[in-house]
Amino acid sequence: MDGGSLPANIKRTSALRRVPPLQQIRLRSTCGSEGDVCAFELPSHASPIVVESATGRMMTIAPGDVFLGTPGHRAARRWIAGSIPEGGLVPGNDYWVLSDSGVIGKLVSRSHLEVHHLGRVRYLGAVYGDSGETLNIRQFGVATSRGPDRNAPLHLILGTSSEVGKTTAGVAVLSTLRLERRTNVVALKATGTSSFAELAQYLDFGAVEAFDCIDFGFPTTYPVGRKDIVDFFSTALDFCLSYPADAVIVECSGDPVSADAPKLLECVKARRSNLKIILAAADALGAMGAKMALAKIGLEINLITGPCTDTAILRQWTEDLCGIPAINMARDSDSFEVAED
């Protein structure tokens, strides 16, 4: 498709949210690599799929639509796992939409649960710029750190699994900080797959900035064990900690002992010895396991929340088993404090 072009108002997914509007969208028939701005077509015989647009709204891709996304990896064990084949995506071949943010690759496994973005699409080619270079989201990431570490307090949000209320806990911490007149708060979703909707929750509740992997040029932080993951975590943390903020909230996806979460914890621990850790846990036993795992690397949980606090009996059992204060932050976020030692 060398020399081919697409309309400037073509649908684009949220993985490309930092890519500025393009007056001309020119395609090249070349293999697509991680982060490249690429065009895909949903076949006319396919069912519609729903993805997240660059503005954050949920957007339908109709049969026959051409849209922009990016090759990437995903390893969400509860939902979908997929990867970029060796050598990249090949023009004319079919691949799968691995996330609603528009990450495309080879499907490795999937949940039996309904996933509205999952669909097979044809790779058409990569978008190139005025100088002939293939456009990549890394070209549009944030700059390096703005200066030295401002020593803002760091609040680390961890969970025992996905879907246990980590973002809910992070937003509750943010709201409490603002009530304490610490209004300049920065949020970082440090691991996993990008979601503009989740960043928007932090922004809606008053964060002055909210960042994730897209802002630093990565569609996701997968595959697990990637060689540049420590560099990514270091860059993201240093950038957020150089911001003139009253506090920084860092949220880690999944659990703290698998994927690349341990590498993130090492990077955080190297920058803060007195961080506050909030754990969202599905049950008391999971909370206890997380406490033991974190203790092995010298980290201590300050507060437990999540479904293990949904009732008074569950909350008390969690506190008794773990010896750590527990509170349901979705319901009682106004009854705890985040004051520093």
Image (cartoon, rainbow, N blue to C red):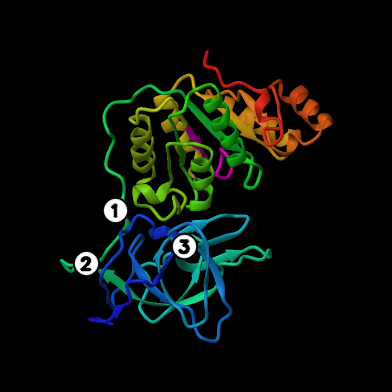
- Which numbered circle lies on residue 87? none
At mark 2, the secondary structure is: loop
Say which of marks 1 and 3 sits in front: 3
Q: For the residue marked with disc 2, what is the amino acid? A: Gly
In the depicted structure, whether residue 155 falls above or below residue 222: above
Q: Which of the pair 1/4 is nearer the observer?
A: 4
- Which residue is found at the position 39% from the left and 39% from the top? 233
Mark 1 vs 3: CB contact within 8 A:
no
Which residue has dot 1 on it? 140
Q: Visible in this render: residue 283?
A: no
What residue type is disc 1 on?
A: Phe
The residue lying furthest to the bottom in this view is 45
> Which residue range is magenta in the image?
249-259
Instruction: Give the mark, 3 or 2, whose residue is nearer the N terminus.
Output: 3
Q: Quadrant of residue 117?
A: bottom right
Q: Is residue 54 covered in magenta?
A: no
Residue corresponding to mark 3: 53
